[in-house]
Amino acid sequence: WLQPQNQKPPLINPCSTYNPPYNLAYVKPTYMVNGQDRGTQMWAQLAQQFVAHVDNKFPQVHPLYEIWNQPDGGSFLCMPKSDMNADQDRVTAYKAIFSAAAPLIRQQSTKDGVQVKIGGPALVYAMQSHLNYWLPNLLNDPSIYPYMDFFSYHRFLRGTSFNSGSNSFVTNAQDPLLGVDAEYEQVAKLVHAGKQPNAATTPIY
């Protein structure tokens, strides 16, 4: 119900403009009220309710809430196929989602007396060009950086499409440009140049 095609009247879901279509759920939240899109606000309220539930049912847990997943990947925060500024529009959409949800997550956890950490965006391509574009956009935005406790990204060590043609786990892990250490150093340098985030983290897949 937070997808464009489920509004009244139905709107075009950008994920459906591809052949084959991307997963229709990988779209910016959309919720039309009197002609105004309240999707990100509604999604943020759902996030707040989720935090309240976890705090109530599992008060001993101190979660790390990672907002969204791989918004830099074309199919994970869909923009229309005809969008000539898709990368910038993904950043803009993600910032709207984060800046709506993060304050409510912090507000709820503070009210519940539970310490949590908030971060994201779980980049799919943590390579220099993406890092240089995404991190400054996030870490220099006053609606983002006060709430970003960690920055997350993915590092795929298998699969030739992510590793310059190599399928060797060891080679990919030790690559001087894209290896685990090299990539972390690139991320850490940009994080330290930013405003307030205090950690760079990476799940290894």
Image (cartoon, grey):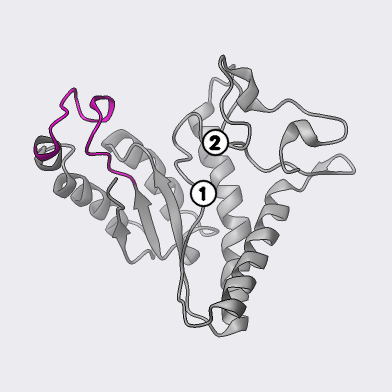
Identify the residue at horizontal 44%, vertical 54% (top origin). Answer: 120
Considering every residue shown, the one lying at the far top of the view is 19
Q: Nearer the viewer, residue 141 or 109?
A: 109
Could you classify mark 1 by the number of other residues whose Cα lies within 10 Å: few (under 14), some (14-19), or many (20 or more)? some
Identify the residue at horizontal 57%, vertical 72% (top origin). Answer: 54
Residue 155 magenta: yes
Identified by mark 1, the residue type is Trp
Secondary structure of the residue carrying numbered label 2: loop
Identified by mark 2, the residue type is Leu
Could you classify mark 2 by the number of other residues whose Cα lies within 10 Å: few (under 14), some (14-19), or many (20 or more)? many
Considering every residue shown, the one lying at the far bottom of the view is 113
Residue occupied by mark 2? 77
Q: Nearer the viewer, residue 119 or 76?
A: 76
Image quadrant containing the C terminus = top left
Left or right position of 10 against 15: right
Q: Nearer the viewer, residue 91 or 110?
A: 110
Identify the residue at horizontal 56%, vertical 41% (top origin). Answer: 92
Residue 21 magenta: no
Q: Main secondary structure of the magenta part?
A: loop
User: In the rendering, which numbered label is found on residue 68?
Assistant: 1
Question: From mark 2 to mark 1, how far is it between C-alphas?
Answer: 9 Å
Contact? badges 2 and 1 (CB < 8 Å): yes
The stretch of residues the image draws in magenta is 154-170
The answer to whether residue 58 is above or below residue 9 is below
Q: Position of residue 79 (x, y in %)?
A: 58, 28
